[in-house]
Image: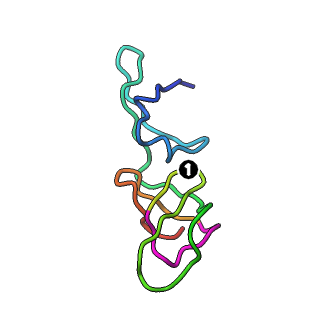
Amino acid sequence: QVTVPKDVVGDYAPYLQENMTVRLSMYDGVPIAIELPQRVTLEVVETDPATSGGKLKPAKLSTGAVVQGPSFIARGEKLRIDTRERRYVERA
């Protein structure tokens, strides 16, 4: 197990999950970069009520990340998130 400084994790922190396999680049034994899986599955813990209409709305995920998702998603649903673009891809 390796401790990775916050500045290396950076904007990826809200997409990290326990026991997730990541790629860690090291230089002289010091972590310098992290690469997460391209997609992760996270649960919606907070969002406005589901509606139809095709608009986007914010959805807070189980890790604290907030993404814009379609209006039909609801609390408790699991979503696939693209970690590179930090955006909703599809329902899981």
Magenta region, residue range = 68-77
Magenta-drawn stretch, dominant element (helix, strand or loop): loop
Q: How many marks?
A: 1
**Dividing the picture into quarters, in which one does residue 81 lie?**
bottom left
Q: Does the magenta stretch include residue 73?
A: yes
Which quarter of the figure has residue 85? bottom left
Q: How is the image coloured?
A: rainbow
As rendered, which of 24 and 12 lies closer to the eye? 12
Q: Which amino acid does label 1 sit on?
A: Gly
Q: In this view, does 65 lie above or below 13?
A: below
In front: 58, or 36? 58
Secondary structure category for the residue under label 1: loop
User: Is 76 located above or below residue 6 in the figure?
Assistant: below
> What residue does disc 1 label?
64
Rendered residue at 60%/68% (across/down): 77
Q: In what quadrant of the picture does the C terminus appear?
A: bottom right
Farthest residue to the front: give it. Answer: 48
Q: Residue at x 45, y 68 (%)?
A: 69
Foreground residue, 8 or 57?
57
Q: At which x and y percent is residue 15?
A: 49, 47
Residue 90, compared with residue 22, is above or below; it is below
Q: Which residue is drawn at 42% across and 66% down?
A: 89
